[in-house]
Image (cartoon, grey):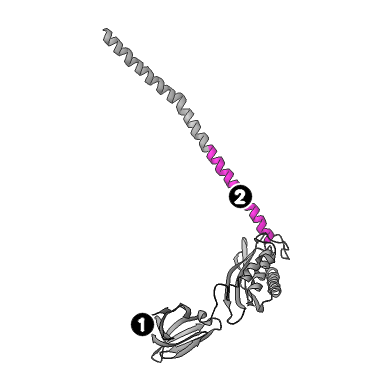
Amino acid sequence: MKKRERILAIIVGGMLVAYLGNWAFQAMLQGPLDERRARGERLRSEIEKKEGQLRLARAAGKQLTAWQQQSLPTDLELARSLYQNWLLELVRVAGFEQPNVDSGETVGKKEIYQKLPFTVRGQGTLEQLTSFLYNFYRADHLHQVQRLSITPIPRSQRLELSMSIEALVLPEGERKDKLSGRTSGRLAAENLVEYRAIVERNLFGEGGARAYDESDFAFLTAILEVSGQLEAWFTIRTTGEILKLGIGQPFQVGQFRGRVSEIDNLDVVIDSDNERWLITLGENLSQATALPPEL
């Protein structure tokens, strides 16, 4: 074998040895090591996931325990009676006029929870409403105000109030025959006097959002054909009165005076103070749009 051939053979042999050595290293050492590392990462990820689930379960357990402490009594009818009487006492303390507290039908799954709906209605000032809500949320019951409707009563400081309230009964509730007597920690301020700023803003009068007038509550609720003639029906929501107006008929609601000029299927045109106003079905008089003089 010539010298040049021997050198080439040595180089090829060296390359083959290096390749086989690398193959052996990958197969016998690096491969298992990488697999072990990947398995370790999977195990760490699973451990973190399980620990997260455990933390959530512990938190849920604590929350469930808190809810069981807040739950109304497990005797459903007794819970309804006690809670309704409690609401009546809150209404009395707040000083609502013409108060009414009703309860509705129970809904929910008996083995999980049962929901008792209540409705509170009455008339009161913003200060009285603030007092009611303060005492409501200060009590540590499993309840909440689902809906609150506030309608200012014209020419007075009083409000027409309507509240939808829900309270829950849990089957594993802490008490069987009485309401919770604890104070909740959900309020931002502990003392009622700290909520005085709400009352002082006078939201429904001068210095508040703006002064209200009956025309704010006169809604165009229907356009009907009566005896071959179209009529525009306005509902005054503060009183429940319905004005049934035909073309050419004058009317007054609060400070708004006008005369019906035109009626079509969706809109009514009203002449008022040398101006023409367009109001669409569903709007109130204060939402009417001024029309250009040429229309």
- In the picture of the structure, the residue carrying the numbered disc 1 is 293
Look at discs 2 and 1 and give the one toward the viewer. Answer: 1
Q: Which SS type dominates the magenta stretch?
A: helix
- In the picture of the structure, the residue carrying the numbered disc 2 is 57
Could you tell me which quadrant the N terminus lies in?
A: top left
Which portion, as a residue range, is magenta? Answer: 43-71
The residue at 68%/69% (across/down) is 83
Q: Nearer the viewer, residue 142 or 154?
A: 154
Q: Position of residue 257 (x, y in %)?
A: 47, 87
- Relative to 48, residue 188 above or below: below
Sequence-wise, the earlier of marks 2 and 1 is 2
Residue contact between numbered discs 2 and 1, judged by CB atoms under 8 Å: no
The residue at 51%/79% (across/down) is 216
* Residue 60 is a magenta residue: yes
Q: Position of residue 45 (x, y in %)?
A: 53, 40
Q: Amino acid at mark 2?
A: Ala
Asked if one can make out residue 164 in the rendered structure from this viewpoint, the answer is yes
Asked if one can make out residue 284 in the rendered structure from this viewpoint, the answer is no
Could you tell me which quadrant the C terminus lies in?
A: bottom left
Q: Position of residue 183 (x, y in %)?
A: 71, 61
Q: Work out which residue is located at the far bottom of the displayed protein and give it.
A: 227
The residue at 30%/11% (across/down) is 7
- Could you say which quadrant of the image residue 46 lies in? top right
Q: Is residue 118 left or right of residue 255?
A: right
Q: Amino acid at mark 1?
A: Pro
Q: Position of residue 205 (x, y in %)?
A: 58, 76
Mark 1, other Cα within 10 Å: few <14 / some 14–19 / many ≥20? few
- Could you say which quadrant of the image residue 161 lies in? bottom right
* Residue 4 is a magenta residue: no
Determine whether the residue tagged by mark 1 lies in a helix, strand or loop. loop
- Relative to 4, residue 218 above or below: below
**CA distance for labels 2 and 1:** 69 Å
